[in-house]
Amino acid sequence: MLTISARNLSRDYGSYSAVKEINLELKHGEVLGFLGPNGAGKTTTMRMLTGNLAPSSGSVEICGIDLLDKPSDAKTHIGYLPEIPPLYQELTVNEYLRLAAKLHRVNSAKICSALDEVKLQCGLKNIGNSLISSLSKGYQQRVGIAQAIIHDPDVIILDEPTVGLDPNQMREVLSLIRNLGTKRSVILSTHILSEVASVCDRVLIMHQGQMVLNDSLSGLKEKEISLDEIFSQLTRDNESSEEI
């Protein structure tokens, strides 16, 4: 079952093309590593895939629903964690996740069970009454992931979910992502190649707004090409300083 189907997805800013005719398919139960240097167009692409930015051309379907024609229906199938988690520091974990559940239109009769489920999944069971401001960076990332999955979406898109974490926190979050990928489709955007190698089934590399690689990790191994090597070959002439 296809959960994401993007066709000829492009985004222009005046005469500058930030993303150029991206074609992407993602299947249920597949974890995709989304790589590229700064300025490659990853964040722009993810914002289009989540309906937060309209494409200049092209189309996106989420679980067979056209994201441009029926955005509300399509977005019920998407969970999104941007690079800066959208947390309200003055709320407790429980208060924030209840708010997230309501915003995601979770049935009011199911909110309590949804909270219990995501807190268990994300290792937040014993800190529901803690203020988000009092939590470590790692636990705040867990709360961010919890808000992205509280409505049980088919697609989860995570933008740099391990940035700023220490090695132990990083391992815990990657383990969580690996578990999420067994039942859903996941797009993991990261600059850390070892993260992709440890949790992903496929890798997509962007460079200067274009897709330059879309392959399975097993396919790369069969070709005896390391991820580090192929990434360096395909992006070595990048001189962009900052991603749009």
Image (spheres, rainbow, N blue to C red):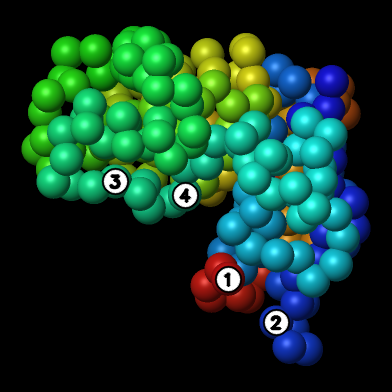
Residue drawn at x 61%, y 35% is 76
In the picture, measured across the screen, residue 230 lies left or right of residue 93, that is right
Q: Which residue is mark 3?
A: 87
> Considering the image in quadrants, where does the C terminus appear?
bottom right
Calculate the distance from the C-alpha at mark 3 to the C-alpha at mark 1: 22 Å
The answer to whether 243 is drawn above or below residue 47 in the figure is below
Q: Nearer the viewer, residue 102 or 3?
A: 102
Q: Amino acid at mark 1?
A: Ile
Element on which disc 4 rests: loop
Q: Earlier in the sequence, mark 2 or mark 3?
A: 2
Secondary element under disc 2, as helix, strand or loop, is strand
Residue 19 picture location, percent across and down: 76, 66
Depicted 224 relative to depicted 123: above or below: below
Q: Any mark on residue 82, and which? A: 4
Q: Amino acid at mark 2?
A: Tyr
Residue drawn at x 36%, y 47% as measured from the top left: 85
User: Can you identify the residue that label 2 sits on?
Assistant: 13
Disc 2/disc 3 C-alpha distance (Å):
29 Å
Q: Disc 1 vs disc 2: Cβ atoms closer than 8 Å?
A: yes
The structure residue drawn at horizontal position 12% and vertical position 24%, both measured from the top left corner, is 129
